[in-house]
Image (tube, grey):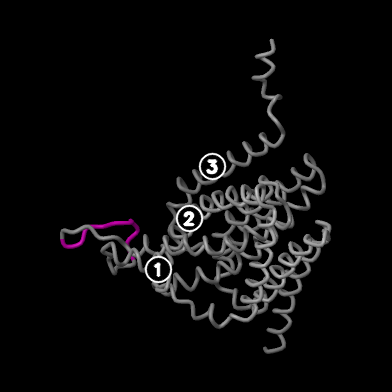
Amino acid sequence: MTNLILLSPFSISLDSWLYLGFGAFIIATLILDLGFFQKKQNTPSFKTTLLQTAFWFVLACGFGAVLWLMKGHETGAQFFSGYLMEWSLSADNIFVFILILKFFKMPDTSHQRVLFWGILGAIIFRAIFIALGSALVAQFHWVLYIFGAILIYTGAKIFFDKEEEENYNPEGNFIYKFLKNKLPFSNDVNHIAFAVMENGKKVYTPLLLVICIIATTDVIFAIDSIPAVFSITQNKLVIYSSNIFAVMGLRSMFFLLSSIIKRFAYLQQGISFILIFIGAKMLLEIFNIQLPTFLSLAIIIAALGGSILFSFVMEKRKA
């Protein structure tokens, strides 16, 4: 009887059920993506991408509501704070992704495939980073203060380095130099496979090169975003789910924002303010000052909404 009770599904903790449900959802989504959406190589319409972006946003809010009801309002607020922060940082990622695709003159029909594999790589790398970050913070709490200093520096750098980002050159990427030195590449950007035969020799395609560059670029972004979410919570479920929901909606947001991202001229300043605020919040813990999660959530929403609204106002004035 005791063994039966131990094997009962009701003996599994609530966190385990949430992990299992979230993991099953992500796997099902990736299978659906590979089996259905990957067959469509055309660029989706603005209406389609708007609906897809709304779909991912509603799903994230639904998961946040589940956490709120099952784990309490504090955990729910932590999820929404983490998700909104990661979502805003994803908008900055998209700008660099657009520059990479334009630099290599990748056709529009390849964008779906590039972004899918880039997002898959981001999910894997972020899982590794979160596991490592959790282990470090659990063993050495003072690592959070280093994270805070990194975020303040990064926020200040983003605020002033807009021209540097606009002149981003993927050829300076380490993985680009390594792969170009080690592997033969085709110059034909229209290949949809990772490797093809040309003149009787196996060569790799620009598609593979671009996917690798986007994946490693996201690793660099993760160095900013993972420490930022650790300032909100050390709950691994909240950290991972808020990150992954933001990443899973990245592709639809790419197609949604690619044509209008120039209109968000001051979003970068809003993002930099959020990073500086989060970094300062981490460092305040040295003096035993802890800001409430709801205050952090309100400031993140105000910074995002304010920077977007200011961008539209300034654009209208210029027009």
Q: Quadrant of residue 117?
A: bottom left
Q: Is 58 colored magenta in this rendering? A: no
| Image quarter of residue 286 | bottom right
Residue underneath mark 1: 107
Circle 2 residue? 116
Q: Position of residue 249 (x, y in %)?
A: 59, 56
Which three-letter amino acid code belongs to the residue tagged 3? Ile
Mark 1 vs mark 3: give the one in front. Answer: 3
Residue 302 location (% of width, % of height): 78, 68
User: Observer-nearest residue: 285 or 233?
Assistant: 285
Name the residue beneath numbered marker 3: 27
Q: Residues in magenta?
A: 190-199
Quick check: 188 above or below 142? Answer: below
Q: Which mark is first along the chain, 3 or 1?
A: 3
Horizontal placement of 302 versus 7: left or right?
Answer: right
Q: Assign a secondary structure to mark 3.
A: helix
Side of 17 relative to 40 (left or right): right
Q: Residue type at mark 1: give it.
A: Pro
